[in-house]
Image: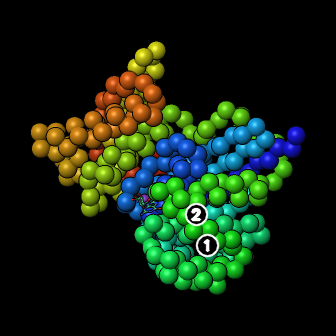
């Protein structure tokens, strides 16, 4: 029996629905999703195994012009996604303008590997608008195969999946056939807590926060987790904690519920907040938090 395997890397502007699509394709909530740009900071693998195939999806941060060191690392993850792809999934959303980075865009239109251009969020458009958009993208990216989808409503996601299988090269698997991702459990704890912070705070808070799971102890029926919530300034620490600790308590409850779903076990979650000045611009710190490849 022939076996197919390969890397399918999802790239595009912030907020077009890349993480929503990856989760839909993998059937697990591996990538966190919010309406805020820069929710995804890492390259996250989601692996789907069949008897005769292994698809390794990569979700990546949205393409931006980096303004500080953390964002440089985020764009390095995007670059790496160009380098090892067997199929490039370029996602755009209905009504969007050009890709924010000309160099990345050139790499897409000159790509030697197959490009699937997914026109997402078609649940928000009508037939006329859809046809106009398809025409527009056909001109812009002539080498791409265009598939209109709604990642959120699971429309045409199976079509994308089936087409990817067809495009995969013959290859033995790259990961064990029971692998779901390359990231350790602590990574998903960090991400789930960060998602709840993104959902509960606004202004600069979502961008100033990093999470570090310091303890992850799994017993038969419970997982005990201690996580550090890092911010850059004292004022941000005050905002995170909130009046009489109400804000952080809410985050803790929401994160615990999500963690229990993710791990399928009872969770005991303890969080505390610390100021770590300028972690976003300090290379050594960034490396510690997994931002260097
Ligand atoms: P990413 O930044 O590209 O990873 O985008 P996300 O997956 O985080 O999604 C950004 C926002 O778009 C979220 O609020 C999603 O719920 C929403 N979204 C994603 N896919 C769709 C879709 O097909 N239709 C609509 N209406 N919204 C979507
Ligand atoms: K997002
Ligand atoms: Mg994302």
Q: Name the spot of residue 229 as percent of width and height, x first.
A: 33, 41
Quickly name the residue at label 2.
Answer: 11
Q: Earlier in the sequence, mark 1 or mark 2?
A: 2
Q: Is residue 196 left or right of residue 177?
A: left
Residue 196, disc = none
Q: Secondary structure at mark 2?
A: strand
Please tell me in which quadrant of the rendered image residue 137 appears. bottom right
Q: Name the spot of residue 245 as percent of width and height, x first.
A: 16, 39
- In the image, 44 versus 4, the foreground residue is 4
Quickly name the residue at label 1.
Answer: 104
Q: Name the spot of residue 128 as percent of width and height, x first.
A: 50, 81
Query: Farthest residue in the front direction?
Result: 127
How was the colour assigned to the protein in this rendering? rainbow
In the picture shown, does residue 180 fall above or below 217?
Answer: below
Q: Name the spot of residue 50 as percent of width and height, x first.
A: 72, 40
- Residue at (38% x, 37% y) in the render: 258
Marks 1/2 in contact by CB < 8 Å: the verdict is yes
């Amino acid at each position: 029996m022939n076996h197919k395997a390969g890397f399918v890397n999802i790239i595009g502007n912030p907020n077009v629905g890349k993480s929503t699509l990856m989760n839909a394709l993998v059937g697990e909530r591996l990538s966190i999703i919010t309406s805020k740009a820069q929710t995804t900071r890492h390259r996250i693998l989601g692996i789907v195994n069949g008897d005769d195939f292994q698809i390794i999806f990569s979700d990546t941060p949205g393409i931006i012009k980096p303004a500080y060191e953390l964002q440089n690392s985020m764009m390095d993850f995007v670059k790496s996604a160009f380098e090892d792809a067997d199929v490039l999934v370029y996602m755009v959303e209905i009504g969007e303008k050009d890709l924010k980075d000309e160099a990345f865009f050139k790499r897409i239109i000159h790509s030697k590997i197959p490009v699937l251009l997914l026109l997402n969020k078609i649940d928000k458009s009508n037939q006329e608008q859809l046809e106009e958009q398809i025409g527009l993208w056909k001109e812009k990216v002539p080498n791409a195969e265009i598939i209109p989808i709604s990642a959120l409503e699971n429309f045409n996601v199976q079509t994308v999946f089936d087409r990817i299988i067809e495009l995969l090269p013959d290859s033995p698997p790259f990961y064990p056939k029971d692998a779901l991702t390359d990231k350790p459990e602590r990574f998903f704890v960090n991400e789930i807590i960060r998602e709840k912070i993104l959902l509960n705070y606004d202004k600069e808070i979502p961008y100033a926060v990093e999470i570090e799971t310091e303890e992850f102890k799994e017993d038969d029926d419970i997982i005990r987790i201690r996580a550090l919530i890092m911010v850059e300034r004292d004022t941000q620490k005050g905002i995170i904690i909130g009046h009489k600790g109400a804000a952080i308590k809410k985050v803790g409850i929401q994160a615990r519920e999500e963690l229990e779903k993710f791990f399928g076990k009872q969770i005991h979650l303890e969080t505390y907040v610390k100021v770590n000045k300028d972690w976003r611009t300090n290379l050594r710190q960034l490396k510690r938090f997994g931002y260097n490849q």
